[in-house]
Image: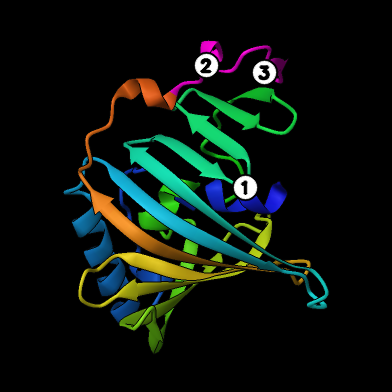
Amino acid sequence: MRALLLIISTLCLSAFSLFAQQGDPKAKAILANVTKKINTVKSIKAAFSLNLSSANNKVKETKRGQIQLKGNKYRVSIGGQEIICDNKTVWTYVKDANEVQISSYNPSEQTISPAKLFTNFYDKEYNYKYLGVRMSQNKKCDAIELIPISKGKQFAKIEILIDQSSSLIIGGNVFEKNGNKIQYDVTSFVSNAPMADAIFSFDAKKYPKVETVDLR
C-alpha cells in the first residue's frame, strides 16, 4: 500500500516553476516541453502498470491500473483498490474488506501523486540531470534523473522516460531509500476525455454495507 501511495502521491496539475540552478539546460528544456504539452490538456485517462521489486529481488509484484485526472482531482483503480480525490478529501476503498478510509488531501506530503506522473513533479522540489536516449515501448525516449532536494522524501531518486515524439512521460523508475524499486509504464493515454466531477468523490450508495474509517 505504501508503494502504491508513493506513486499516487507523482500522477495534480499545478503551477510550473523551474530554476536554472536545479539542473542542466537540456533536461530543463525537455521538462518545459512536457509542462507546455500537459497545460493544454483538461483531463487525462490512462492505463499503467507497476512492477515492484525488493532490494534483494526476492519479492516481485506486478500491478495494473487505470487513472482518470481532471485538474487536481483523480481516481485510480488498481489491485482491488480505488483511490479517489476531489482535491479536498481522499477516499481509499479496499474491495476485499469492503472498507473505505477517508483522509484529508495534503498536497505537501513528502510522497510522490498519480497526477504528477504525467506533469510537473520536477519543479522546485528537485534537481535534475539528462541521462541520454533510451528505448521504451518501442519508442525513443529522453531519460531524466530527478533527485529530491528535501531529505524528507521516501525515495532517493526518480528516473523518468519522456517520449520524444509526444513530449509525454510514458514510464520510469522510483528508487526508494530502502533499496526497493518501482518501475512504472503508461500503456495507454487519452487526453481531454469527458469526465463528470461526480466520479471524483466516493458514493457510499454504490457500495452496500461498506465500513467507513474516518482518519480526518
Numbered disc in front, either 1 or 3: 1
Q: Residue 44, percent across and down?
A: 30, 46
Q: Is residue 113 above or below residue 198?
A: below
Residue range in magenta is 201-216
Residue found at x 50% / y 46%: 113
Q: Callout 2, which amino acid?
A: Lys
Answer yes or no: is residue 24 visible.
no
Q: CA distance from mark 3 to mark 2?
A: 22 Å
According to the picture, the residue beneath numbered tag 3 turns out to be: 216
Residue at the (42%, 36%) spot, across then down: 74
Q: Is residue 136 left or right of residue 192?
A: right
Question: Measured from the top left, where is residue 211 in percent x and y?
Answer: 72, 16
**What is the x, y in percent for residue 173?**
55, 71
- The amino acid type, in three-letter code, at marker 1 is Gly
Q: Pointer 1: what residue?
A: 79
Q: Position of residue 110 (x, y in %)?
A: 62, 47
The amino acid on which the numbered mark 3 sits, given as a three-letter code, is Arg
Q: Residues within 10 Å of mark 1 (few under 14, many from 20)?
A: few
Kindly state the secondary structure of the residue where label 3 is placed.
loop
Q: Which mark is residue 206?
A: 2
Establish if 69 lies above or below 169. above
Kindly indicate the quadrant of the structure image that contains residue 150.
bottom right
Identify the residue at image location x=60%, y=41%. 109
Dot 1 lies on which element? loop
Q: Is residue 9 above or below residue 3?
A: above
Is residue 208 magenta-colored? yes
Residues under labels 1 and 3: Cα distance? 24 Å
Residue nearer the viewer, 210 or 102: 210
- First in sequence: mark 1 or mark 3? 1
